[in-house]
Image: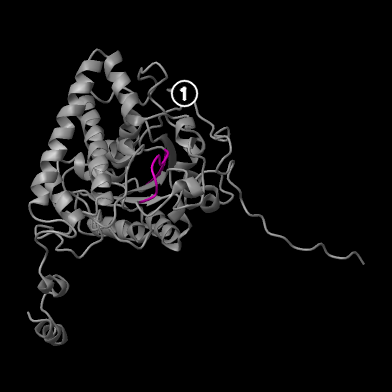
Amino acid sequence: MVEPAHLSLHVPEPAVRPGGQPDFSNVKIAKAGAVSRPPVDAAAEDMRDLAYSIIRVLNRDGEAVGPWAGMLGDDELRDGLRHMMTLRAFDARMLMAQRQGKTSFYMQHLGEEAVSCAFRKALQKGDMNFPTYRQAGLLIADDYPMVEMMNQIYSNEADPLRGRQLPIMYSSKDHGFFTISGNLATQYVQAVGWAMASAIKNDSRIAAAWIGDGSTAESDFHSALVFASTYRAPVVLNVVNNQWAISTFQGIARGGSGTFAARGLGFGIPALRVDGNDYLAVYAVACWAAERARRNLGPTLVEYVTYRVGAHSTSDDPSAYRPKTESEAWPLGDPVLRLKKHLIVRGAWSEERHVQAEAEIMDEVITAQRKAEEHGTLHAGGRPSVRDIFEGVYAEMPPHLRRQRQKAGY
């Protein structure tokens, strides 16, 4: 009798550790314009290849090429560039504010601006996003006031959420931005449920779910896919693959599926991968997926291949788990610089206008910051009332909460 072999586990390893040479040779990038654009009503089984490639529009020369190009004019592209530049400037000021002790916490979007800014322009009034903490571009691109965002970050007396949410966990029904949950992946099942309710009411509004690559390992992700595929919910299921969860590389959560988009195939859901640093490609894919939802063709799973340039949050030190120069080696480039180059190629922008726009935008952000700080910061100025702790949960406050409020002096 042959002795059975000892069992062992396979533990995925990142391609390189801190101090090593960055390596993205495993990222297979399709030539810009090479990936086909199927009809909106195509069956999932007829486009399985889209779950393994990367849809790209902008080539290295800054030209828009291929079947996904040609959807945006100069004015729309300039607006998109401005939105991304605004989000980047906003990040810079709020990161500085956190370091100065004006707020307790902040999370940047550096390198991922195109994903949320471009996606928002594919939606309509009344559609609802169920975001994570790194989709503030959905608000910026919808002209949500920066002062209100900063008030929330500072948890000051003008905070629209009255100090009851962690900084950067915004909420705005009017702007289609569902309250962010700190429990990751819950937004996926919430989005599918909201989309199902919209369909049951014979409404015309669709939902968009957002999740990071690390959170796809949560059970809520898979539960949402079951319900979305079974009932053909009018929802766009977004996975932002920025290569890193908090401190673990994307291979841990991806498992043996090859890509995150490929997970949709097992549920019969159309699945696409898109260059998340290509504003034009993100917009085109978002429009395609949103149209499917509006035409009662069911959900679409979209994986945005991008890179988190900054730390996970102000509580994180990425040098502990990845090379310091890794972001410089990222092969899909910088979304702001790529759209800037495209506009210059089109003759709709210039280096001089870009420098001027950077100064104008930073001035707008600083002005908004000063207005917000007039209402207070973490350790100075006005704060929400303690009374607000008890408000906003029940339509009619139950007796035990009334007693607690009275004991607190309110």
**Residue 75 makes an appearance in the image:** no
Q: Is residue 35 magenta?
A: no
Front residue of this view, candidates 85 and 128: 85
Where residue 163 appears, as percent x and y from the top left, is 17, 63
Where residue 81 appears, as percent x and y from the top left, is 24, 29
Specify whether 65 is left or right of 165.
Answer: right
Residue farthest right in this picture:
1
The answer to which quarter of the image holds residue 115 is: top left
Q: Residues within 10 Å of mark 1 (few under 14, many from 20)?
A: some
Specify whether 90 is left or right of 148.
Answer: right
Where residue 324 appears, as percent x and y from the top left, is 48, 39
Mark 1: which secondary structure?
loop
Colour convention: one colour
At 20% from the left edge and 39% from the top edge, which residue is drawn? 141
At 25% from the left edge and 25% from the top edge, which residue is drawn? 72
Quadrant of the image containing the C terminus: bottom left
At 27% from the left edge and 14% from the top edge, which residue is drawn? 346
Q: Which residues are magenta?
A: 300-313
**Residue 182 makes an appearance in the image:** yes
The residue pinned by badge 1 equals 34
Image height check: is 102 above or below 259?
below
The answer to which quarter of the image holds residue 152 is: bottom left
Q: How many marks?
A: 1
Where residue 294 appears, as percent x and y from the top left, is 26, 44
Quadrant of the image containing the N terminus: bottom right
Image height check: is 153 above or below 279?
below
Front residue of this view, candidates 181 and 259: 181
Specify the amino acid type for callout 1. Ala
Front residue of this view, candidates 113 and 19: 19
The answer to which quarter of the image holds residue 219 is: bottom left
Image height check: is 117 above or below 387?
above
